[in-house]
Image (cartoon, rainbow, N blue to C red):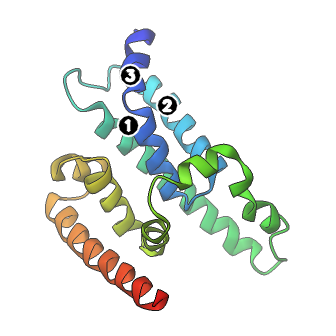
Amino acid sequence: MRSEYMRMLSDCEGKLQRTAYYLTRSQTDAAKDLVQNTVVRGYEAYLRGQFTPGTNMLAWLQRILNNLFLTDENHRKKWETARSAEAPDPLLAVKAGIATEPEAALLSNIFSEPVEKALMELSYEMRVCILLVDVDELDYAQAAYVLGIPVGTVRSRLARARIRLHALLCKQEIEQE
């Protein structure tokens, strides 16, 4: 059973890494942790029979990844709100230096610099729709399943995200001239 899960997982792992990288806004360690937690949670759910054979495993794992990301974000926001009155983050300088890792450099070259910069400026809701539908090539129903929202909401967010992404890229082009 484990080998079957690992075989199916090997087809999805790269896309999970890419999605996690952009959801965490290029924080390589956070992205790795997110994927690792997704793989573990997915395996536990797989053993409990919560994955239906013949369905899209990538969509199923992306939903787990998305849920873990949102849970972590909510915890982080609560923690930062509690700490904001105390003192500035002492790890800020360490967090800024992630590009020195070879894996960070590899992942950062997935998109051109202008596209990556524009993606990072999008809200989470817009960014995740672009990643799931346009990058990972999930259909609207699968993306809706991953996000736990109606298909119509995916369509409208995606339309707004594409318009916003286009505007950001045009703005960057004008600024470079």
Mark 1 or mark 2: which comes first in sequence?
Answer: 2
Q: Are the residues tagged 2 and 3 within 8 Å (C-beta)?
A: no
For the residues bearing labels 1 and 2, Cβ distance under 8 angstroms:
yes
Q: Which mark is residue 39?
A: 2
Relative image position of residue 8 (x, y in whole percent):
35, 22
> Mark 2 belongs to which amino acid?
Val
Residue at left offset 46%, top offset 71%? 114
Q: Which image quarter is the N terminus in?
A: top left
- Spot occupied by residue 112 in the image (x, y as percentages of width and height): 45, 62
Q: Is residue 152 above or below residue 18?
A: below
Q: Residue at x 60, y 42 (%)?
A: 32
The residue that label 3 is drawn on is 46
Give neighbour class at mark 3: few <14, some 14-19, many 20+ (Cα, 10 Å): some
- Which three-letter amino acid code belongs to the residue tagged 3? Tyr
Cα gap from disc 2 to disc 3, whole angstroms? 10 Å
Q: Residue at label 1? A: 61
Give the structural element (helix, strand or loop) at label 2: helix
List x then y, in percent, for residue 115. 42, 68
Q: Nearer the viewer, residue 75 or 104?
A: 104
- Considering every residue shown, the one lying at the far front of the view is 177
